[in-house]
């Protein structure tokens, strides 16, 4: 969670009682709501990705599964569309796709704002907040005292607890806060906490300026410092933020890898915010990154719009996945995005796994399997040699601009080919597959409104992770104002937002002689919000 030095003036507004359909947000006991058909059909509103009904959102916090419900918490300012006094917003889902906003979980206290953190289910009742029969959900979050910071004091960020014993509906702030402080620090935040089976205790990893710290606890209230972790940095990266630590998968494989996530406000591969990852070993006390993690920057996402990514907790026993979600924006322009009542969305949840490339073990991502339930219809794309342009969406007879596109393309003679998403006004988003330089180039310069922030239209470049440069797998999830590209079997990912005058509803493949479309499919997807409105009727 970033504390901006310059914060836009909060635009306080009168709240009117509006009939509730599905989406409702309760703010400190005073409920206001909005009709989904009105709020979720505005220009640029994502139809596949979660966004709050109104106002500002940034980092995802404490995603967790409890009793059949997926909970997503997030940094939220309920009175403005720019960053301000941070609350924990809250939304729930049964399928990771359709979300219902709940009342605010944690509001600022006299000790400060509620910055980022995580949520655990205290099954053993180590905290005493619940019981063995009814375990408490416990949030571990940073309390940020902005007045102390502005006064030049140190130690203005401390770690606090809040808990819920009714499945996350109501939250109580712990009277004994803070539970962890560091008086001589100024960037001490974003605790990610999990139960470590091998040592039978809680482990927390959090940022401490330009390095990370690992702590342990028996009861979530008293913490012991275990180790410091100094990670290799990128130029201009600043402090670390929003770390996460998880063992990938639950198999008995002795090579099970630990994954460490850490975000940087600046210093991303294409400018601004981004999330790095490190593979390595963890023994309950120290994390040791592998050799490649120490020498080569590796990014969860090479696109400019995936930051502060975090990991789902407490997945059911029969779900072996590692699930990830990120904030789909960038601090360089997040507060200037051309939306009115709401600002920013989350990525789709993703499944993470270890894969291989020519350099060794790498992280790979794929869209969650639940996405298949949004498919209205799927049309195969015929095999063909490409010489010029093919309009894939028209040939498949799909429309609307909400697509799940999968292609396998062979290019032996051609130096490059381009995947182009376009609307009737000629606005387009383009992905160049550049075989000569072994890279992908994502161009949003012609997507419509790009002038609201300097550099927004700059190209985004990612290296190819695959061993061959003749056969390419491409999967693209296209929304009305966002796209997620899963390339090289998910080993290269690019996420971007854009703001066209109308959705980019046609899909084209542009190539010279020497490109063969081996196979493919395009699925027309249903809006998660329109579907929610229909169900409410």
Image (tube, rainbow, N blue to C red):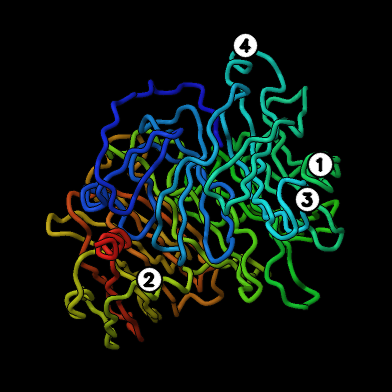
Q: Is mark 2 in CB contact (under 8 Å) with mark 1?
A: no
x and y, in percent, of residue 153 in the image: 68, 15
| Front of the two marks 1 and 4 | 4
From the viewer's perspective, is the residue at label 4 or at label 3 nearer? 3
Are the residues tagged 1 and 3 within 8 Å (C-beta)? no
Residue named by callout 1: 228
- The tag earlier along the polypeptide, 2 or 1, is 1
Quadrant housing residue 213: top right
Q: Are marks 4 and 3 in contact (CB under 8 Å)?
A: no
In the displayed structure, 246 sits above or below 225; it is below
**SS for tag 4?**
loop
* Structural distance between the alpha carbons of marks 1 and 3: 13 Å
Which residue occupies the foreground of this view, 221 or 350? 221
Residue under circle 2?
415
Q: Where is the N terminus found, in terms of image quarters?
A: top right
Q: Is residue 365 visible in this depiction of the protein?
A: yes
Mark 3–mark 2 Cα distance, whole angstroms, equals: 49 Å
């Amino acid at each position: 969670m970033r504390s901006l030095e310059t914060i836009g003036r909060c635009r306080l507004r009168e709240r009117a009682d509006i009939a509730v359909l599905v989406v409702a947000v309760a703010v400190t006991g005073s409920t206001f709501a909005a009709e989904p058909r009105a709020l979720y059909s505005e220009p640029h509103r994502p139809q596949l990705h979660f966004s709050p009904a109104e106002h500002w959102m940034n980092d995802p916090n404490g995603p967790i599964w409890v009793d059949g419900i997926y909970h997503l918490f997030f940094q939220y300012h309920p009175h403005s569309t720019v960053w301000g006094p941070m609350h924990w917003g809250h939304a729930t889902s049964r399928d990771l796709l359709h979300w219902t906003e709940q009342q605010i979980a944690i509001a600022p206290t006299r000790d400060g704002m509620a910055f980022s953190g995580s949520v655990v289910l205290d099954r053993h009742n180590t905290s005493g907040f619940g019981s063995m029969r009814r375990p408490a959900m416990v949030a571990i979050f940073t309390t940020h005292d902005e007045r102390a910071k502005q006064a030049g004091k140190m130690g203005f960020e401390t770690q606090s607890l809040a808990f819920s014993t009714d499945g996350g509906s109501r939250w109580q702030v712990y009277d004994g806060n803070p539970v962890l402080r560091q008086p001589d620090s100024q960037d001490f935040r974003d605790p990610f906490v999990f139960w470590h089976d091998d040592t039978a205790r809680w482990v927390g990893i959090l940022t401490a300026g330009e390095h990370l710290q690992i702590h342990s606890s028996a009861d979530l209230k008293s913490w012991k410092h275990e180790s410091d972790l100094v990670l290799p940095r990128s130029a201009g990266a600043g402090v670390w933020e929003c770390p996460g630590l998880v063992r990938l998968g639950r198999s008995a494989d002795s090579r099970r890898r630990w994954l460490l996530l850490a975000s940087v406000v600046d210093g991303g591969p294409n400018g601004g915010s981004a999330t790095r990852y490190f593979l390595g070993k963890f023994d309950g006390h120290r994390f040791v990154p592998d050799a490649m993690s120490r020498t080569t920057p590796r990014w969860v996402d090479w696109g400019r719009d995936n930051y502060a990514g975090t990991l789902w907790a407490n997945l059911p026993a029969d779900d072996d996945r590692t699930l990830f979600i990120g904030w789909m924006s960038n601090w360089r322009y997040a507060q200037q995005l051309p939306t009115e009542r709401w600002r920013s969305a989350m990525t789709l949840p993703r499944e993470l796994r270890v894969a291989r490339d020519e350099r060794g073990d790498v992280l790979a991502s794929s869209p969650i399997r639940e996405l298949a339930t949004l498919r209205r219809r799927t049309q195969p794309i015929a095999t063909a040699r490409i010489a010029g342009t093919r309009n894939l969406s028209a040939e498949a007879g799909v429309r609307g601009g909400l697509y799940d596109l999968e292609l396998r393309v062979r290019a032996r003679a051609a130096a490059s080919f381009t995947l182009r998403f376009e609307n009737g006004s000629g606005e387009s988003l383009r992905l160049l597959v550049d075989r000569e330089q072994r890279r992908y180039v994502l161009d949003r310069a012609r997507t419509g409104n790009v002038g609201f922030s300097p550099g927004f239209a700059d190209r985004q470049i990612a290296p190819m992770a695959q061993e061959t440069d003749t056969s390419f797998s491409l999967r693209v999830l296209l929304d009305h104002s966002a796209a997620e590209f899963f390339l090289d079997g998910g080993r290269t990912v690019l996420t971007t937002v854009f703001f066209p005058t109308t959705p980019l509803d046609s899909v084209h493949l542009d190539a010279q002689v020497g490109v063969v479309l081996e196979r493919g499919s395009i699925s027309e997807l249903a809006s998660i919000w329109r579907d929610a409105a229909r169900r409410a009727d």
